[in-house]
Amino acid sequence: MLIFLCVSNLFINLDIPGYLIPKIQNEYHEMETQPRDQRINLLSQMIIIQEQLEDLETQLQDAEDLLALADSITLDLEQKCARLQNDNERKDQQIQRLKEALLRKGESDCQNCSDKDSPECPGEDLCGKRILYVGGMHKMVQHYRKIIEERGGEFMHHDGGKEIAKSRLPGMIYQADAVVCPIDCVSHDACLSVKKYCKQSQKPYLMMRGSGLSSLTRELEKFSELKLH
């Protein structure tokens, strides 16, 4: 009788069609006439199967919960990516409009320059503007000077306070048209001073990641685009 009850309970858990249950129950009823050891063994197997079924159902539910969580996270990330992409597009458009406005202003100033297309023209890139280089390697100063002067600029240099007094830095910034400063080869205090006095005097400045010549060349191209007028 115990086997019959267990089998009935197992049928319910397995969701077996109703029309098959009587037939299977009859077959298990016949098994009750088998020796006791065989019935005990059959009961043990049925219990194991039921436990395995319950374990599989638990795993299935856990997997469904994880899938739902993953879907929710994916949707959230997709929405955030879409917002960031829209923000980037708007910022790119704003930057492009600013560049075009600055270029138009620079072209207008260059057109009105009395030295345009004359031997006195210092160069279209920097157009005679004074570029202050703060910091850098002492052995590279002459190369910094060459790069700036080849692009039509006037070179100024302050070593950030190593040999040249720090008190001279504010005055040199006010005299310059733009300032470049390599953060890898100058004191933190000098960097803060550059930012402070450039903002006070409304002078453009660029903090370069490196003191190499390629970094300077790349940053000067940004100044050239702005025309520094």
Image (cartoon, rainbow, N blue to C red):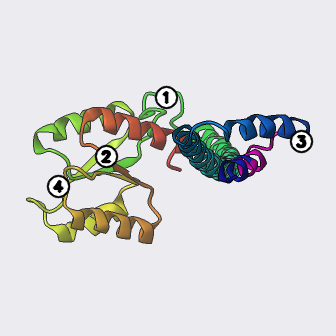
Q: Which residue is mark 4?
A: 159
Q: Residue furthest left?
A: 163
Snapshot quadrant of residue 25: top right
**Relative to residue 49, is residue 212 drawn left or right?**
left
Q: Mark 4 against mark 2, which lies toward the viewer? A: 2
Q: Which residue is mark 3?
A: 18
Reading the chain from its start, which is encountered first: label 3 or label 4? Answer: 3
Label 2 to label 1: alpha-carbon separation = 36 Å
Instruction: Report if the CB atoms under discs 4 and 1 are less than 8 Å apart.
Output: no
Reading the chain from its start, which is encountered first: label 3 or label 1? Answer: 3
Which of the labelled discs sits on residue 209, or is there none?
A: 2
Magenta part of the protein: which range?
8-18
- Amino acid type, mark 2: Arg
Reading the chain from its start, which is encountered first: label 4 or label 2? Answer: 4
Q: Which residue is mark 1?
A: 118
| Residue 91 in sight in this render | no
Which of the labelled discs sits on residue 134, or is there none?
A: none
For label 4, count other residues whose C-alpha is less than 10 Å away and answer few (under 14), some (14-19) or many (20+): many
